[in-house]
Amino acid sequence: MLISSHLIRRPAMRAGLIALAALGCVQAVQAQTARDDGQASGGAAATLPAVTVRENAALRPMDLPPAHAGRQVASGTRLGLLGSREVMETPFSTISYTSEHVQNIQAHGLADVVSRTDPAVFNNGATGMLLESMSIRGFNVAHRDMALGGLYGLTPFYRVTPEMFERVEVHKGPSALLGGMPPGGSVGGAVNLVPKRAGSKPLTQLTGAFMNEGQWGLHADVGRRFGPQQEWGVRFNAVWRDGKGPVRPQKLGAQLAALGLDWRGARARFSADLFESRDSLDGVNRGISLAPGVPLPRAPNPRTLLAPDWTFGKSKDRAVILRGEWDVTPNVTLWANAGQGKFDFDSIASSVYRVADTQGTFINDFAHQRDQRDRRAASAGLHARFATGSVAHQLAASFDWQHEQRKFGFLLRMLSAPWVTNLYRPAWGPAVSRAFSNAALPPSGNSRLSGFAVADTLSFADGRVQLTVGARRQKVSSASSSWFNPAAPWTFYKSSATSPAVAVLLKASEQVSVYANYIEGLSEGQSAPLGTANAGQLFAPYKTKQHEIGVKLAQGDLTHTVALFQIKQPSAWTDPVTNRFAADGRQRNRGLEWSVTGQLRAGLRVLGGASWTQATLTRTAGGVNQGKQAVATPRRQAKLGLEWDALPGLTLAGNLRSASRQYIDAANTLHTPGRTVLDLGARYVLPTAGRRITLRAAMQNVTNKAYWAGQLYSGLGAPRTVLLSATVDF
């Protein structure tokens, strides 16, 4: 019996190996008896086939790691260029949420998933906005910068309906080497969304849902495999939601149709994903700004809509992605994927939202915005495993390309005079014209990103020491017009940058891994604006640099990660003395994070942790605000999510989220107070024969706490919200 695994950390895996070993011993005894009997009788000797046992680290580069204990998260994640890695084999801080977890928390958006229990992620808590918002390690991560099956630029632009994904993979910190430069230049972290695939068992599942105030929803999930070896797979997801939201009198709607096709051969695999996603919002929630000298007002009732119900936002996203993988040899895999997507957005929302005095006088105006984007992306690469002497190598190389064409239109102020009302008792006038919804849009820009990356993971001492080294060469080119003046001359930009990375992982024991990394993030540089002494000068892509050290501990069915990091991000400003525009600004985020996932014991699951983040403005224009904490970044966060199987079929859940205060101005003179928000839930699997029926209930913000969501323009935190759903497996 041949056992190729040397890292067996969990009791279930150890038990499996013991069982296999026992089976092998029995087979060996039986085979030896057969040989003896055969030799005694003159017959042919029996041959015992070799048994090979593999663990997560031996998965193919693009395989999906299995679920971790408790099935809320996976036992590993895919690291873009580097492929699939088990969590204890990963020299970065990562987490991957399963579709089962997404379904159980009744998530309506991606921020619900990523920010719920991760202390490295801050979500302002607002609801009913044009887009979801979150930051990782103190830096904003835009939805347009999330990858879909490893490709940037094809996810829904403003809001993601999560029901179509098997995994939500999160890498904390910059990641230029791993996935390339995101189109929006986000550097705090990377999110990759893994589409669902048909499993070996037929799936037909229907979920009905309800949210308080009157929103109804349906979700159908169907999967089948066909063929003699089940080589063909079809997975279809459809979502419909419509009705009133928790903020009155807002209405929310979402529609999704997603089809995943795949073919699995002995040495090759191909897949196709097609989806159309629509999101609608009547009554676009907005926040406030403060007139000079006005202190922070108390938060209104969290159900208050701070805009008229005739404001709206509508978006439509469509995309198709093709992917192929070919195992040239058992140790060499070639892969390629390509996709195209379209985005169409139409909205009327507040453009002025200013509180003028301590009585809550609220001044408003409105803008009409249209945005259309045609997006294409492709990538190709290889993964190879080989050895040079006693050193094992995992070599990876990839080329990626993105292209986006944009059309944009903007009517900045639509009222002849600003509308004046009161923050605590808002009253609104008649709706403005929507004629601009039918206007032709002028081209506003196009951009191209391309890059080549190579990395090698070298394993020493039987894999106990791993060193990853790599670099990416990134090219950026763009042309754009002014959003506010399409007749103005276009600006052109073309530059490139090389970003290296190095990471080391030491497996001190089968339960402890120590790691360190240096990795960079890339954001598109800027050109000096008109009026500056160096107008027109182009700047290379900005490099955000991270240093991180950490420890991972596998303690039974629990996995702990403790990470200490420093991230330095440049920014650009005009020097008030020389009038020169330069990338001389700096922000430095230092932090300490602890996170825990898995099971405390059978039937008691946990997700959570705590973080401390010092986001300091270390270099600012004229030295003003130097040394201050960056806005909308709490220094401390703590989160705890628990699930307890209290009775057969009955699971009780609770989730606590706490964040310290957040500054709302760069001078740190105003801040929103810290907050603690409690969510409760339960689910029950009915003891029925033939069909599995799961009932779920949740109450978010149980105390109906009123709070400002991060920066004031983000509006109010979501009010008490009740979610109900029932899932039937046919």
Image (spheres, rainbow, N blue to C red):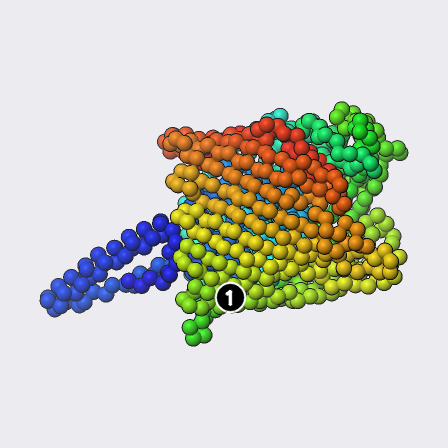
Mark 1, other Cα within 10 Å: few <14 / some 14–19 / many ≥20: many
Residue type indicated by callout 1? Leu
Question: Camera-side residue: 229 or 79?
Answer: 79
Res. 639 visible in picture: yes
Left-right relation of 695 to 16: right
- State the residue at coordinates (50%, 42%): 607
Q: Quadrant of residue 367?
A: top right
- Name the residue rendered at 82%, 63% in the picture: 537
Residue tagged by mark 1?
467
Image quadrant holding the C terminus, namely top left
Q: Quarter of the image holding residue 471?
A: bottom right
> Where residue 190 sits in the image (x, y, percent)?
60, 53
Label 1 element class: strand
**Which residue is rendered at x = 59% and y = 55% of the image?**
565
Q: Is residue 4 above or below residue 391?
A: above
How many marks on residues?
1
Question: Looking at this rendering, what residue extends furthest in the bottom direction?
Answer: 389
Query: Residue 619 vs residue 599: left or right?
Result: right
Along the line of sight, which residue is nearer the eye, 562 or 699?
562
Which percent across, then down, holds residue 468?
53, 65
- Farthest residue in the left direction? 40
| Of residues 401 and 495, the one drawn nearer to the viewer in this rendering | 495
Q: Is residue 252 visible?
A: no
Q: Quadrant of the N terminus?
A: bottom left
Q: Position of residue 328 (x, y in %)?
A: 47, 68
Q: Quadrant of residue 598?
A: top left
**Residue 266 place in picture, x, y as percent:** 42, 61
For the point 57% across and 67% down, the residue is 470
